[in-house]
């Protein structure tokens, strides 16, 4: 495998989102078994002032989408953040995977120093694409995927690290 | 920034471990304020069958260390997994940061296809170094750093996403 902006980004997003899709699928089956209403886990949190599962999935998919859109300069598709059930969250991940499947290596490779404009804590900043990926997109992406997993584990869904790593 | 095996690994570990160090420092101050014994948060978990905070910190530092050791072919320093307080966990992170500070870009760059031998779920596997980094080391590293943060947030330590991202 050649090291390139594509190889260190899109395949990572894809792998982790496929794992997250399977994790949410297991949560759905477990919720049905335990007769938990479809919206309960989607609204579960680790602390009252942390965001719920639905937000974690929305943010993870958004981080991947915006990375591609900002580096390629293409407009990002707009996804309403209105998912309320695990089934809707699976559909959200499917949309992200379909979007990522349309990205070619040549769309990203060679752009690692391209300046990317974004807002960080309300301020306009410009970062080279690789810095943006490594120090903003990836930590946020992994934060949201892991926290989604942690919320489900905390709520008794039978999952293991293998589900997370894939 | 040039995209290279070093640039996509060691600076990421360093940044996230420095953030984790600051997070554990905040937890320590908060525990002192709330008169929580030093070993309580280190032993806290999100679920009875999940690992506690101390393990998350040990694993995050180990993942970074073993990546460097396996790709360079140097022996990894041995760290006893015996930390029981937040102060000891900070010392563990300091050791990892000191180890990473001794790694030069030339130690890693160009080795992205070097076969790395490791055990995955009890089986001996060989992966090219870049695959090992992107699809094994990084997901595990971020999993443990995020779960450490999540354990502390779940236990009421006042932290925000900014502490995680740095």
Image (tube, coloured by chain):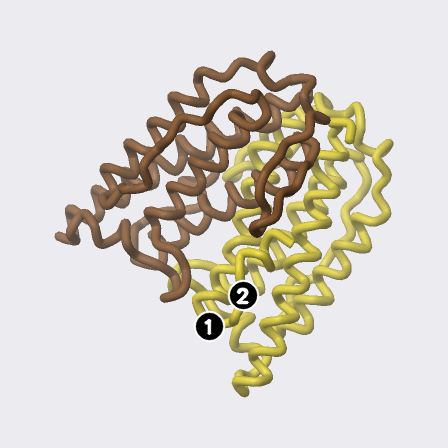
Chain colours: A brown, B yellow
| Quarter-of-image position of residue B124 | top right
**Chain under numbered label 2:** B
Identify whether A66 is placed above or below B59: above
Crowd band around label 2 with a 10 angstrom C-alpha radius: few (<14), some (14–19), many (20+): some
- Of B22 and B1, nearer the camera is B1
Could you tell me which residue is drawn at 35 percent across and 54 percent down? A52
Coordinates of residue A50 in the picture (x, y in percent): 41, 60
The quarter of the displayed image where residue A60 is located: top left
The residue at 51%/20% (across/down) is: A74
Residue A8 figure quarter: top right
> At which x and y percent is residue B137?
61, 39
Callout 1: residue from which chain?
B
As measured in the structure, the alpha-carbon distance from the residue carrying label 2 to the one carrying label 1 is 8 Å
**Residue beneath disc 1:** B156
Residue found at x 68% / y 54%: B17
Q: Quadrant of the C terminus of chain B?
A: bottom right
* Residue A117 in the figure: left or right of residue B10: left
B4 over B153 or under it: above or below: above
Residue at 54%, 65% in the rendered image: B159
* CB contact under 8 Å: marks 2 and 1: no
Judged from this view, the residue extending furthest toward the bottom is B35
- As drawn, is A58 to the left or to the right of A123? left
Please name whichever residue, A10 or B45, is drawn nearer the observer in this view of the structure.
A10
Element type where label 1 sits in the image: loop
- Label 2: which residue? B159
């Amino acid at each position: 495998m050649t090291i390139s902006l594509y190889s260190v980004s899109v395949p990572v997003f894809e792998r982790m989102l496929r794992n997250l899709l399977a994790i949410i699928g297991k949560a759905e089956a477990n919720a049905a078994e335990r007769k938990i209403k479809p919206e309960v886990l989607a609204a579960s949190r680790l602390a009252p002032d942390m965001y719920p599962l639905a937000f974690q999935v929305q943010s993870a998919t958004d981080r991947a989408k915006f990375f591609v859109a900002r580096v390629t300069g293409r407009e990002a598709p707009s996804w309403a953040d209105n998912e309320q059930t695990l089934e809707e969250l699976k559909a959200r991940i499917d949309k992200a995977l379909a979007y990522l499947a349309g990205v070619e290596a040549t769309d990203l490779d060679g752009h690692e120093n391209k300046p990317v404009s974004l807002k960080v804590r309300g301020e306009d900043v410009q970062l080279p694409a690789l810095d943006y990926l490594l120090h903003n997109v990836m930590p946020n992406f992994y934060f949201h995927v892991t926290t989604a997993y942690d919320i489900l584990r905390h709520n008794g869904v039978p999952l293991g690290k293998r589900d997370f790593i894939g």
